[in-house]
Image: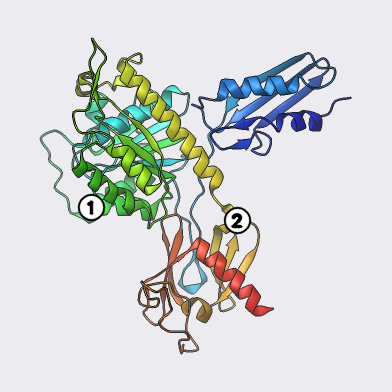
Amino acid sequence: MLSEKDVLDKLSVVRDPDLGRDVVSLEYVKNIRVCAPIVSCDIELSNPASMAKDKIRDDARKALLELPEINEANVEIKWRVTASPEGVKRALPGGQVAPAPQKPEGVKNLIAVASGKGGVGKSTVAANLAVALRQTGASVGLCDADVYGPSQGTMFGLTARPEADSEQRLIPLEAHGVKIMSMGLLTTKETPVIWRGPMATRLIQQFMGGVLWGELDYLIIDLPPGTGDVQLTLTQSVPLTGAVIVTTPQDVARTIAEKGLRMFRPVQVPVLGIIENMSYFQCSHCHEKTHIFSQGGGESISSELGVPFLGGIPLDPEVVLAGDQGEPIVARNPDAPVSAVYREIATRVAAAVARVNFDSDTADRPKEILEEDGKLKILWADGSATSFPFDFLRNRCPCALCVDEWSGKRKHLILLLPSNFRPMTVEPVGNYAIQIGWSDSHNTGIYSFRGLKEMAVELEAAQK
């Protein structure tokens, strides 16, 4: 008699090309039903836009029909978007514990859309990417974080002002199935935004924590161009799933986009890929492609820096017209060639998010950091715990004052520390590290989670 194990053994040869693993080890196989000569199951993918879903279904049916006594195999493809990990609880003076940096309530993944400079069509890309992801069936929001030049309200034809609920949380407006919040919806065209950096960053924090986004698979964040306060606030205050960089083919745009890409690496925000906008112009009559702004800039950056190239978007006057008239091209004309390009890019972005979430090494992530018995105790996601003596961590501070930037050698091997020496602050840095402020006024050390895990192994070996 056939069992569920027999079914799983057969399905272990079926692979998801997005993640490069078989559907059994990924725990995609659900609801196995065996009633010879019929066997049925569901396969739940993590990418709602997967281009391989038909192949996965066919491969699964073929594998199941190899089972003895089976002549009919029914496989239904479903999907469930995975969520990126949350931040980390941390110790405060007096033994209290600060809450972990959180994604907005109900939001699974935060995707930043960034560019090194203005004028590359970043906001247009963000709007159409949001609509294309929504067309896959995923729930999607769009946060216009470009405080000084908000445009998403115009691109989606929104004129109403957002209302607030009983708890004074803003309720996003909705267009084409996408939930939208923008500074442009809170001001008028006659009211310019003249704010200093701290005011802009507070507004972004309000958009993250004070907007009733609801249950979302993806929240697209349209960042301002460049590498300023808003970008830094986001990377440090919320756990971003990843970032998409938009550029154009010219050398100058390519160089500046490279700087924008490098901004995310020190804070360990995964770069999901490069999108090249205005990649070429295609004649509607002869279909000949003309590369007006040079050629291959986006692919060149992705190759040099080792990040995926998500695709090149053609220069199409209809895209501009659709945006100006308040309807992104993917919604206005889904059959247009440029809309098909946007959908392909959305598919690759969704696949990249699934890979990032799968590759997150949860065992190397703290769940909670607290002071206990004169030590800094870390509770790891794998269930283990490490109690670090304060002097052990202080003597291994990774900052440039303590470690030579060029040689990597420690400048001071052993510090003479007072008996009451202790950490005064433990602050999160993005979704990858903590910054400890010590009682000797030293506060420049950023301890990555992976580095702390390596120190835990070192400490365990020293204590044996």
Q: Is residue 426 left or right of residue 203?
A: right
Residue at 63%, 21% (x, y): give it: 57
Mark 1: amino acid: Met
Q: Are marks 1 and 2 in contact (CB under 8 Å)?
A: no
Q: Front-most of 11 and 369?
A: 11
Specify the quadrant of the image occupied by residue 213: top left
> Which mark, residue 363?
2
User: In the current view of this chain or complex, which residue is farthest to the right?
Assistant: 1
Q: Is residue 210 visible?
A: no
The local crowd at label 2, few if under 14, some if 14 to 19, many if 20 or more residues have their Cα within 10 Å, is: some
**Is residue 394 rendered to the left or right of residue 156?**
right
The residue located at (43%, 79%) in the rendering is 410
Residue 313 locus on image (x, y percent)? 30, 27
Q: Which residue is mark 1?
A: 199
Asked if residue 447 shows in the view, the reply is yes
Counting residues from the start of the chain, the first of labels 1 and 2 encountered is 1
**Label ID, residue 58:** none
- Measured as percent of width and height from the top left, residue 207 is found at 33, 43
Residue under the image location 56 percent in, 37 percent down:
19
Above or below, 368 against 46 in this view is below
| Residue 265 in the image, given as x and y percentages of width and height | 38, 54
Task: Say which quarter of the image contains residue 386.
Answer: bottom right
Left-right relation of 60 to 388: right
The amino acid pointed to by label 2 is Ala
| Quadrant, the C terminus | bottom right
Considering every residue shown, the one lying at the far top of the view is 285
Residue 24 sits above or below residue 94 on the image: above
Which sits in the foreground, 280 or 429?
280
Q: Secondary structure at mark 2?
A: helix
Tell me the quarter of the image containing the N terminus.
Answer: top right
Image x and y of residue 279, in percent: 26, 30
Residue density around tag 1, few if under 14, some if 14–19, many if 20 or more, within 10 Å: some
